[in-house]
Structure formats: C-alpha cells, structure tokens
Image (cartoon, rainbow, N blue to C red):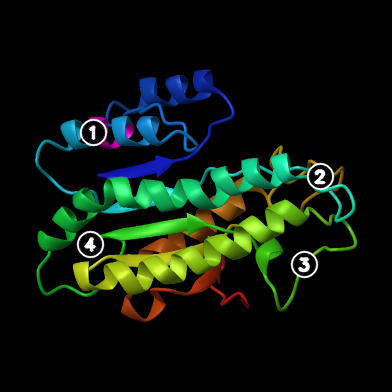
Amino acid sequence: MQALVGKVPSLQELQNLASKHPNLVIVPLEVSNPASIKAAAATVEKHLGGSGLNLLINNAGILKINSLANETLEDMRQIYTTNTIGPLLIGQAFLPLLKKAAQGSPGSALSCSKAAIVNISSSGGCISAPLGWDLMQIVSYRCSKAALNMLTKCQSLGYREHGILCVALHPGWVQTDMGSAAGHQPPVTVDASIQGMLKVLSSLSEKDTGTFLDWEGKVVPW
C-alpha cells in the first residue's frame, strides 16, 4: 500500500478522485498535531490488514513570503512545525508499518517497492546554491527545507538497518498555488513534475538512500 501524506487543496477534489478509484482511501491528517498523526497511522494499519506500508511520501508544506528583515518567531515556528517536525513525527509513527513491509521482502535491495520514506524538499533549501534569492527570500521556508534535508539524511542512517530507503526529492518549481505565491510563473507543470517524480521513485535503489534528487533524477546540491 502507498500513502501520500500531506495537506490537500480541496477535500472535494480528493473525494471525487476516490469515487473513481475504489482502492484509494482518504485518511485525515494534520501534520502539526501529534495526536492526529498517531490516529492516521492507526487507521492506515487497519486498512493494511496485517501488511506493511511500502511507501510514505511526506508532501505537506507551507510557505510565507517573508524577507530576512520581517521574519518572525511565530512564522518560523509554524513553518518548521509543518515542513520539518511533521515529517519527523510521521516517520516515527509509520515506522512499524514500514519495518513490516521491509521484513516482508527479506534479502531484497532497498527500493520504494520494499520500504521507503520520501520527503518532498526544495532547491530553495540548498545552502550551496540558494535558488531564486532575488525573486523570493522566503527565509523560514528555506531554513525549514534545509533542515528537512538533514532529517532525511538522519533517517537514512537510522532506518537503513531496518531496510528502509530514505530520500529527499525536489519536485521542481511547479505551477501550483504555492509555486505561484510570489506572483511569478513557475516553469514546471504539475503533470511534468508528477510524471518525473514517479519515474524517479521507480528507479531508486540502495545507492540513492540519503541523497537529494530532483524530479528528473538529477542530484541537487546540499
């Protein structure tokens, strides 16, 4: 079973999608609420019926158009809670199910079909190459994604012994509400980003755990 964990733009859109695909189960989850995370993990476990969870994608993310001069404690805390702490707690809550999936594939190499955590990151969090600084400073967002990249590295080190692959994935600057928040037209369409990421996920292997890749499979600098 695969689970896409993240905030959604429209519950109605998801319900419409679920009505067309009976195997799609919608599980409510607020990533900033530990009790909600635990409840979601318990619900997923029930639906799995004794099987493990092969793929966990942490996709929830928020952004505020703040400059270095007007960044605030409140905004920094809120964005870190969703973008960085949420994936940490979700990884912890779903770890038993991921471990069960990995144990169900003894001897096989790391992959998304065995057990994997994919954290949706951003090249905006690159320390060596901070993309788009002149367009958007978005300090709290950049810091949270840089921290998410380190979390991904830590998860890859801590969960490797359980047979779980962990990777950070940059989806591109995508034409979404968030991507267009600063009034600029992003270059990557939603379809191109999704198709690219699906191709990357299908090809991930042992050598990729703990790395930072983009939707085309290219290595993104830390």
Q: Quick check: 205 above or below 62?
A: below
Q: Residue at x 22, y 75 (%)?
A: 109
Q: Say few, some or many: other residues with alpha carbon within 10 Å of mark 3 (under 14 / 14 to 19 / 20 or more).
A: some
Give how far apart the Cα atoms at labels 4 and 3 are: 33 Å
Task: Name the kind of residue labelled 1 in the image.
Answer: Ala
Task: Name the kind of residue labelled 4 in the image.
Answer: Lys
Q: Are marks 2 and 3 in contact (CB under 8 Å)?
A: no
Q: Are marks 4 and 2 in contact (CB under 8 Å)?
A: no
**Which region of the structure is painted magenta?**
40-44
Secondary structure found at label 3: loop
> Can you tell which of label 1 and label 4 is closer to the viewer?
1
Secondary structure found at label 4: loop
Residue 141 counted in the magenta span:
no
Q: Residue at x 37, y 81 (%)?
A: 207
Q: Quick check: 101 above or below 4?
A: below
Task: Name the kind of residue labelled 2 in the image.
Answer: Ile
Secondary structure found at label 1: helix
The residue beneath circle 4 is: 114
The residue beneath circle 2 is: 65
Give how far apart the Cα atoms at labels 1 and 4 are: 21 Å
The residue beneath circle 3 is: 131
Q: Are marks 1 and 4 in contact (CB under 8 Å)?
A: no
Q: Are marks 4 and 3 in contact (CB under 8 Å)?
A: no
Q: Quick check: 216 above or below 101?
A: below
Give how far apart the Cα atoms at labels 3 and 1 are: 39 Å
Q: Position of residue 70 (x, y in %)?
A: 87, 47
Give how far apart the Cα atoms at labels 4 and 2 are: 38 Å
Task: Name the kind of residue labelled 3 in the image.
Answer: Leu
The residue beneath circle 1 is: 42
Q: Say few, some or many: other residues with alpha carbon within 10 Å of mark 4 (under 14 / 14 to 19 / 20 or more).
A: many
